[in-house]
Amino acid sequence: MKNNQKILIVGGVAGGASAAARLRRLDEHAEIVMFERGEYISFANCGLPYYIGGEIKEKAALTLQTPASFHARFRVDVRTFSEVTSIDATNKTVTVKNVKTGEAYTESYDKLILSTGAEPIKPNLGAEDSARVFTLRNIPDTYRIKEFIEQNNPKRAVVVGGGYIGVEMAENLHSAGLDVTIVEMANQVIAPLDYDMACDVHHHIESKGVKLLLGTAVKSITDNGSSLQIAYEGGEINTDMLIMAIGVKPESALAKNAGLALNERGFIVVNENMLTSNLDIYAVGDAVEVTDFVTGQKAAIPLAGPANKQGRIAADNICGIDSRYTGTQGSAILKVFDMTVATTGINEKTAKRLGMKYDKSFTYSASHASYYPGSVNMSIKIIFEPNTGKLLGAQVVGYDGVDKRCDVLATAIRAGMTAYDLTRLELCYAPPYSSAKDPVNMAGYVIENILTGKVKNFHWHDVKDLPRDGSVTLLDTRTTIEFENGSIDGFINIPLDSLRSRIHQLDKSKPVYVTCQVALRGYIAARILMQNGFDVYNLSGGYRLYHSIFS
Amino acid sequence: MKNNQKILIVGGVAGGASAAARLRRLDEHAEIVMFERGEYISFANCGLPYYIGGEIKEKAALTLQTPASFHARFRVDVRTFSEVTSIDATNKTVTVKNVKTGEAYTESYDKLILSTGAEPIKPNLGAEDSARVFTLRNIPDTYRIKEFIEQNNPKRAVVVGGGYIGVEMAENLHSAGLDVTIVEMANQVIAPLDYDMACDVHHHIESKGVKLLLGTAVKSITDNGSSLQIAYEGGEINTDMLIMAIGVKPESALAKNAGLALNERGFIVVNENMLTSNLDIYAVGDAVEVTDFVTGQKAAIPLAGPANKQGRIAADNICGIDSRYTGTQGSAILKVFDMTVATTGINEKTAKRLGMKYDKSFTYSASHASYYPGSVNMSIKIIFEPNTGKLLGAQVVGYDGVDKRCDVLATAIRAGMTAYDLTRLELCYAPPYSSAKDPVNMAGYVIENILTGKVKNFHWHDVKDLPRDGSVTLLDTRTTIEFENGSIDGFINIPLDSLRSRIHQLDKSKPVYVTCQVALRGYIAARILMQNGFDVYNLSGGYRLYHSIFS
Ligand SMILES: Cc1cc2nc3c(=O)[nH]c(=O)nc-3n(C[C@H](O)[C@H](O)[C@H](O)COP(=O)(O)OP(=O)(O)OC[C@H]3O[C@@H](n4cnc5c(N)ncnc54)[C@H](O)[C@@H]3O)c2cc1C
Ligand SMILES: Cc1cc2nc3c(=O)[nH]c(=O)nc-3n(C[C@H](O)[C@H](O)[C@H](O)COP(=O)(O)OP(=O)(O)OC[C@H]3O[C@@H](n4cnc5c(N)ncnc54)[C@H](O)[C@@H]3O)c2cc1C
Ligand SMILES: CC(C)(COP(=O)(O)OP(=O)(O)OC[C@H]1O[C@@H](n2cnc3c(N)ncnc32)[C@H](O)[C@@H]1OP(=O)(O)O)[C@@H](O)C(=O)NCCC(=O)NCCS
Ligand SMILES: CC(C)(COP(=O)(O)OP(=O)(O)OC[C@H]1O[C@@H](n2cnc3c(N)ncnc32)[C@H](O)[C@@H]1OP(=O)(O)O)[C@@H](O)C(=O)NCCC(=O)NCCS
């Protein structure tokens, strides 16, 4: 590390500002310049939807630092309205354009960090220039949306895309009083969830009065002056405003033009030290390709935690510390009205796509001891390796305590733990917080029982193919009242607590497919029947999951 | 595993009932008898205080199973009011006394499980038989306390002992309208906390109107008919009722008389399979000695999670499955009015007592993004190995999100993680749930900086010994207003953002002891000063922690 190195940073938000702050702490004498094209640095991208919805009230809350405060604290030369338009990697200079005046100048560097982020994808569907069509990435975008609502008093909004930002925007536009429809091409919202776990989310969103048009690809958008007309296969809707939230693409033109290696999707290629193909240029954040921690494959996972971590790692390396980024596992979380949706690691879709050997478990557990007021259930799906029980991914959907269980599972995945390890986790228990067997322990037990052959499962997607010709027994072990309130076509009812006395009614030569509400009683029934010589399969997730998917 | 084995279980609550249920699932044909001295089985010990305080309203909520429901579901022969009075280990029989009729009989076994629990310690201080003196272990104890309050309308209560149960009882008696005093021999409540972390809890308890008499050993208790008189060194208080909650001792007389190996403190010795010194007798729960997961030393840690887990492990082993209990790390949590207190692994007191090499860190982080409404700070103390950074223990005190961070740390400790690993944890972030750098990541960074020499710390207990003779610089880097609102004796004020311009005012030949509010600005100041040639120490935990301890 030489003295008075000069470091330029392009992009002044999550990755860039984090890198700048760490650089200064490591090197009091470096010359650090941070360029930001926009007016604001260090802003809370993730808070923007909540300002629109009114949850966050103060504009000032959205910016964690100003150029002045950042300079006062870190002596970083922050240049806003300054777009870096090109990099001369040979001469180690960048060209900077003052976006207000159009003036340009060059600046030399010893080391350069790119944290240029990703920009919303804007498909060519028409009405691109309409004042009613918005994307959301930064503070000006946010003000634009908020002002449009305040000034035009729109009644209806369409959000195209049901990802994290789309769903957050739908909730916040709904909070702002609009009648909101989410239009999503896939058959589900929140792609990191599997379809089976998304169904509860769909019900919840709809229960709040937000409409969902799933499996619906927008074909065109037309601004007819007083509203927008959105056409899709089989129909069209009108709206007063539209948020385009179908994903982001890396801002990597600068890197590309400088000759840095990009992958085929345009993300900047970096090594574990966040170094690009040029020895003096680092890149971090949404614009870079990462390694998926679970699969080892290359991926792009645009999240703030990784961007912040990578910024710090790049700074370390520039200052001679061999810090390494060990991959992104995609831990992410979303508030959906009263619900919380959290994911970590891979989902079943990914496991399938990659042809991985996997199995899955569904559990449904109380957020805390059910005898203590306020307990609510959460649904947990875990993807694991069938032989070793190694954890590959988890999805948690529910209310209170979802974030906790997903973070514990994220930590377990990071540690390379198996489902057996989950049974041994010693988590904090008192009635207001958990149960003596925490939902995570419980998921461990359930998987252990699958792995060790204590029970064989079948799944919701197998139900339709079960023979209804009497060649197998379809058995629902819930109480009579539960059964009468709704059951799966073709299933007969023997409540669990009567099973032992009525077991003679069942034909031992036929396989038994058993279910109950959440699969616990089905499991107990399976144990009873198996030990009486039956071939038994238990419906994972039980009637609750089945009903959530098919209702 | 032979067919139709006969298994007897002594104790029908956490460990016993868990063992019985798992046994039945594993072995449909075994004969299983569960003896319980009291009237109730499967009850929620941990919920009892909340029934007294009125938070839990229904008596029925306290029992998860009745003998009848347990028999219906698990075909376990549950015998309540049945005390096992002796074990004949040679002939493999137990003697059972019907505590209602006094009748006795013997019952043979192939395998025996003891889950007899632990009973409250009742010191000989007088008034043992007073109707105003209570302990709390089971449902009859609970009703007794509740009825005493309802019938006698006491105004004042004293809780002797500031452990988990003592503090829970204090809160719940306060909820029930009593004027409560906690009398505790140690200088702090909640022994798994270190003193420095307990101070916030003391302030919170007192702010709710509960009195704390710390460092106060009760010498005698006298029932003078209309009230109790409690004498201690230097004073006495009167009260209408008293809860004795100074800890528990194992119920191991049965095991002892059967010749099973006990440790010197009377806990039953078991191996990893929960097998006692007798090959046909297992023991689980509060009555057994465990291995401390962190130190490897023998310990006794009476908690419901371990008891439930151990019950399942004993059942597994009886059914031929080699399940092992891998030790208890003491993950525990407590609601203290609005506050949450959680601990896992060892504390500093233990590290000291065992002569372990350790270091510690204090951090103070927002429960979620501070720009999103409702964020509150939590205090985290971590004990770690000074060379490797291996995590040894954590204490978290605060409000929202405390349970999550302690469970993540408990998982990290279970995985054998280091502080470096904490920096790499990828936890779920959206503004309502966390920050892009979660408090656990942040603690990792702070420890990393200690381990790699980026900063040297001093601690609150070092402050009094700092020379005030001008031989060292005592520097507070908070703003002028913060400083004027209260500072540590002898410290001068240079706000961090003026430090670079005023650095010439400081004498490079003198060590600088720097502080701020939570140690973040102090750390930045330390980095500035160190790189300008100063020898610098940062006050870990900052003025906030110092003030909590000394105010
Ligand atoms: C509405 C919204 C909600 C989100 N919610 C969450 C969430 O809840 N959780 C989560 O983990 N993540 C969330 N994210 C994603 C998260 O904000 C990003 O992953 C993170 O900000 C990426 O950091 P970055 O530094 O790579 O890019 P950014 O933070 O986007 O910063 C890039 C900056 O570089 C500037 N720039 C680009 N090119 C140039 C140039 N040539 N010259 C000068 N400046 C340039 C841009 O103007 C921009 O300000 C959200 C994002 C949005 C938009
Ligand atoms: C008020 C209170 C609050 C608590 N809160 C928490 C908490 O929040 N979190 C936590 O983790 N832990 C908590 N605990 C501790 C937890 O309840 C115990 O760790 C757990 O119950 C121990 O299980 P066990 O099976 O060993 O003993 P127990 O659950 O106590 O069961 C032992 C049973 O054995 C019976 N018995 C004993 N001897 C005989 C005999 N000879 N014959 C027949 N029966 C016999 C007893 O009557 C008793 O019912 C709390 C305990 C109490 C009392
Ligand atoms: C605001 C911003 C510049 C902060 O950068 P930062 O100074 O690295 O971050 P923090 O203020 O969280 O401080 C972290 C540093 O303080 C240290 N620290 C934190 N608490 C401490 C304590 N109690 N004692 C000592 N040090 C402490 C940490 O170790 C870390 O220093 P290090 O990186 O040198 O190890 C940057 O994160 C940013 O711009 N964020 C907004 C944009 C964004 O992230 N958007 C996406 C999410 S909405
Ligand atoms: C009530 C009590 C008898 C329950 O025992 P239990 O049947 O083992 O426990 P649960 O009802 O939680 O069920 C756990 C079992 O269901 C299985 N299970 C849970 N959810 C499932 C699901 N969705 N699908 C399939 N199986 C499931 C688990 O795998 C486990 O079975 P296993 O041990 O064979 O692997 C016992 O815990 C008890 O008496 N508790 C009260 C006393 C107490 O614990 N006090 C201290 C705390 S207040």
Image: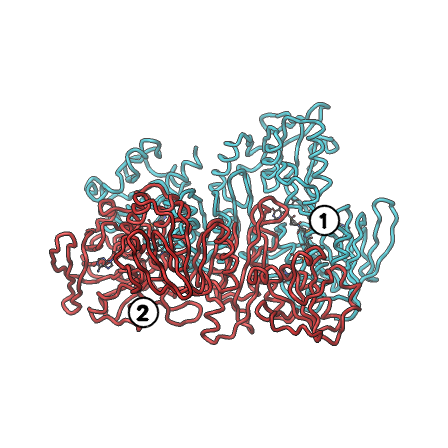
Chain colours: A red, B cyan
**Can residue A414 be seen in the rendering of this structure?**
no
> Which one is nearer the viewer's eye here, B547 or B463?
B547
> Identity of the amino acid at label 2?
Asn
The quarter holding residue B512 reads: top left
Q: Residues within 10 Å of mark 1 (few under 14, many from 20)?
A: many
Q: Nearer the viewer, mark 2 or mark 1?
A: 2
Label 2 packing within 10 angstroms: few (<14), some (14-19), many (20+): some
Q: Residue at x 20, y 69 (%)?
A: A257
Residue B251, which numbered label? 1
Residue B513 at x, y percent in the picture? 31, 42
Per the model, the C-alpha gap separating discs 2 and 1 is: 59 Å
| Place of residue B433 in the rendered image (x, y in percent of width and height, measured from the top left) | 44, 50
Looking at mark 1, is its residue's CB closer than 8 Å to ligand 2? yes
Image quarter where ligand 1 lies: bottom left
- Amino acid residing under circle 1: Glu
Residue A219 point in image, percent of width and height: 35, 65
The residue at the point 57 percent across, 45 percent down is A374
Tag 2 residue = A271
Q: Are marks 2 and 1 on the same chain?
A: no
